[in-house]
Image (tube, helix red, strand yellow):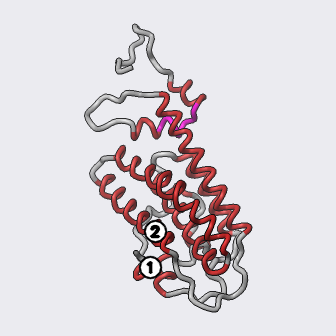
């Protein structure tokens, strides 16, 4: 309620109790993103609970993608190049913007704002909007589903890399599940004649060379060179 924690007042929040109720990552993310430099942090358990829900959102989104990788397999060779839809191009452009913004904020030691930018992208742009559109595109099958699978996988992979410094445990476990699903699935580009710019931008996407053994040692993402696939 805006008061400083004090043993005398008996209003101290035991972090171990908070971790027990909401998880380590939820508390960590709240402490990193809940304040501004130079000001005291007003710790709200409602915010910690909201960030636990964010972790659940990440988990459920990853589960949808891993299931899609297992069930929507390439259905033979494509007779024309695979191109990104408007929704694919939009989310990848937003991913590039988020990477650039996060880099700038991290370089300026504005870690809280950097975390909030990744939060807004993952929950608002990716989970709430693109994933819902992706369900329709996957149902269409063919080249549309191929491009959607690659876009889903690449976007979540890069977003988890951005989020890992803030939420290390959930992102590592989620990324490992995504990695296993990707490596056990055939490339969505198998037997296709996709445009060179698309291959350069998303690459093989599911190739083993893009998946190190653990997220903690994965390369920090850089903006995708989308070329003429950008909006």
Q: Position of residue 202 (x, y in %)?
A: 51, 75
Residue 26 magenta: yes
Task: Say which quarter of the image contains residue 194.
Answer: bottom right
Q: Position of residue 130 (x, y in %)?
A: 53, 62
Task: Say which quarter of the image contains residue 24.
Answer: top right
Q: Circle 2 sits in a helix, a strand or a loop, which is it? A: helix
Residue at image coords 51%, 64%? 155
Residue with the most extreme bottom position: 79
Q: Nearer the viewer, residue 34 or 132?
A: 132
Q: Can you say which quadrant of the picture contains the N terminus?
A: top left
Residue 170 numbered tag = none
In the rendered view, does 144 fall on the left or right side of 106? Answer: right
Q: Nearer the viewer, residue 167 or 136?
A: 136
Q: Circle 1 sits in a helix, a strand or a loop, which is it? A: helix
Q: Can you say which quadrant of the picture contains the C terminus?
A: bottom left
Tell me if residue 144 comes above or below residue 104 in the rendering: below
Q: Nearer the viewer, residue 50 or 204?
A: 50
- Disc 2 to disc 1, C-alpha distance: 9 Å
Residue for badge 2: 92
Residue at image coords 46%, 84%? 197
Q: Would you say the magenta stretch is mainly helix, strand or loop?
A: helix
Residue at image coords 28%, 38%? 37
How packed is label 1: few (under 14 Cα within 10 Å), some, or many (20 or more)? many
In the rendered view, does 126 fall on the left or right side of 7? Answer: right
Q: Position of residue 74 (x, y in %)?
A: 70, 78
Q: Nearer the viewer, residue 101 or 6?
A: 101
Q: Which span is picked out in magenta?
A: 22-28
Residue for badge 1: 229
């Amino acid at each position: 309620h805006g008061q400083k924690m004090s043993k005398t007042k008996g209003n101290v929040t035991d972090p171990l109790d908070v971790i027990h109720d909401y998880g380590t990552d939820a508390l960590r993310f709240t402490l990193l993103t809940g304040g501004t430099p130079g000001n005291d942090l007003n710790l709200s358990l409602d915010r910690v609970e909201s960030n636990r829900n964010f972790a659940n959102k990440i988990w459920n989104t990853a589960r949808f993608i891993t299931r899609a990788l297992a069930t929507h397999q390439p259905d033979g060779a494509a007779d024309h190049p695979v191109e990104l839809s408007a929704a694919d191009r939009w989310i990848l452009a937003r991913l590039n913007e988020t990477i650039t913004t996060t880099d700038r904020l991290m370089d300026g030691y504005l870690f809280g704002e950097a975390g909030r930018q990744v939060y807004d992208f993952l929950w608002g742009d990716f989970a709430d909007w693109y994933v819902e559109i992706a369900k329709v595109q996957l149902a269409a099958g063919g080249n549309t589903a191929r491009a959607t699978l690659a876009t889903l996988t690449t976007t979540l992979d890069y977003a988890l890399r951005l989020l890992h410094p803030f939420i290390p445990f959930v992102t590592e476990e989620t990324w490992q599940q995504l990695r296993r699903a990707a490596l056990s699935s055939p490339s969505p580009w198998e037997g296709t004649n996709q445009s060179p710019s698309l291959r350069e931008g998303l690459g093989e996407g599911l190739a083993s060379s893009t998946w190190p053994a653990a997220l903690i040692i994965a390369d920090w993402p850089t903006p995708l060179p989308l070329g003429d696939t950008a909006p």
